Image: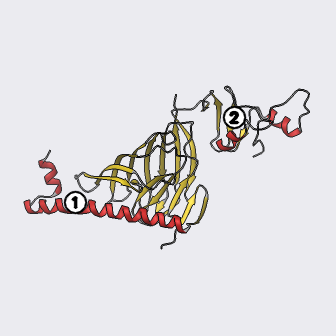
């Protein structure tokens, strides 16, 4: 993008500005590709120190942000702010979103929609590279029965069945609490199979560690995923 | 070991041996948990069969 910059310079008296620097000034506020390049643009040699009142525009999410002295906030943001949108590829056995969580938000909502699975399947979830310590209780039922089924699982390698996949649709709505804080991460997940003989699910759980995560992975229990979008939203802290 | 195609953000590639092993382990464990849950459902249904009730009828009885 023409306006993208990777550094916010600190000028000194009588300094002669380059054409590029003047163009950046004329842009109004610094423009960054992502929050990662934004964070790398301050505090280095010859760069401004990040301080309260700094503005920035993020191309990846089309948002204008300001720094409140402790964290970046989105201008005019509603309760939920889009953090990332990942389009799922073709016949993949897992999908990782690597920059989903940061210190900007404490809590997140993840929506999985569209796309298809190669076969009806549960979709499991992990945080970072952690493969132990997942706890959850699942309540599920079939569209063709009034029976409610419950299933607990303790200290497993993933959160099982956080979302659902069918040959016509991927479906998941997941709330994660404090994944990037040095606390346990808890989860509430919901999903519905798009099939006349399918099932719907609801579950609560947590991850028994205090690792500060930035990434998560969806893995179908069987088969593969194709298409669809994983959207991550941050809940405004204030 | 099965071969898998994995995606990290916008990049799709073949899984490494370690990544494939992690997927296999996760799927195998989930299969065990699912089988245990199915066994519980089957055991409950076996009791209901002895009573001559469907699962929905039993649920109705329990309110």
Question: Which residue is located at x 49 percent, y 43 percent?
Answer: A179
Question: Which residue is located at x 52 percent, y 43 percent?
Answer: A212
Of all chains, the one bearing label 1 is B
Seen in the picture, residue A202 relative to A104 is either above or below; the reply is below
**Apparent side of residue A16 relative to residue A122 in the rendered image (left or right):** right
Q: Secondary structure at mark 1?
A: helix
Q: Residue furthest left?
A: B51
**Apparent side of residue A101 relative to residue A207 in the rendered image (left or right):** right
Q: Position of residue A59 (x, y in %)?
A: 68, 43
Q: Disc 1 designates what residue?
A: B40
Q: Residues within 10 Å of mark 2 (few under 14, many from 20)?
A: many
Q: Position of residue A62 (x, y in %)?
A: 64, 40
Of all chains, the one bearing label 2 is A
Q: Secondary structure at mark 2?
A: strand
Mark 2 → mark 1, Cα distance in angstroms = 55 Å
**Residue A18 seen in the figure:** yes
Count all numbered tags in the image, as a single digit: 2
Question: Which residue is located at x 52 percent, y 39 percent?
Answer: A234
Q: Quadrant of residue A72?
A: top right
Question: Which residue is located at x 52 percent, y 65 percent?
Answer: B18
Q: Position of residue A130 (x, y in %)?
A: 48, 53
Q: Disc 2 designates what residue?
A: A56
**Residue A221 seen in the figure:** no
């Amino acid at each position: 993008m023409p306006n993208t910059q990777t550094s916010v310079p600190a000028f000194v008296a009588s300094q002669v500005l380059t054409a590029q620097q003047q163009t950046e000034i004329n842009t109004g506020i610094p423009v960054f590709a992502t929050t990662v390049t934004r964070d790398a643009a301050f505090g280095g040699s010859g760069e401004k120190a990040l301080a309260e009142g700094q503005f920035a525009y993020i191309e990846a999410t089309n948002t204008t942000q300001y720094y409140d002295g402790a964290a970046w906030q989105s201008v005019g943001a509603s309760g939920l702010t889009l953090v990332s949108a990942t389009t799922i590829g073709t016949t993949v056995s897992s999908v990782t979103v690597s920059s989903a969580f940061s210190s900007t938000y404490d809590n997140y909502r993840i929506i999985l929609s569209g796309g298809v699975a190669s076969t009806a399947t549960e979709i499991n979830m992990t945080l970072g590279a952690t493969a132990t310590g997942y706890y959850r209780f699942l309540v599920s039922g079939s569209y063709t029965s009034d029976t409610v089924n419950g299933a607990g699982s303790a200290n497993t390698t993933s959160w099982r069945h956080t979302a659902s996949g069918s040959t016509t649709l991927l479906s998941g709505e997941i709330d994660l609490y404090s994944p990037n804080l040095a606390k346990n991460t808890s989860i509430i997940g919901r999903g519905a199979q798009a099939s006349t003989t399918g099932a719907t699910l609801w579950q609560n759980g947590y991850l028994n560690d205090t690792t500060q995560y930035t990434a998560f992975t969806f893995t179908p229990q069987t088969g593969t995923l194709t298409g669809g979008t994983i959207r991550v939203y941050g809940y405004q802290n204030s | 070991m099965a071969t898998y195609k994995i995606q990290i953000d916008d990049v799709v590639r073949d899984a490494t041996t370690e990544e494939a092993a992690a997927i296999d382990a996760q799927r195998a464990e989930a299969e065990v948990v699912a089988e245990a849950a199915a066994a519980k459902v089957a055991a409950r249904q076996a009791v209901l069969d002895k009573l001559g009730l469907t699962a929905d009828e039993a649920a109705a009885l329990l309110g």
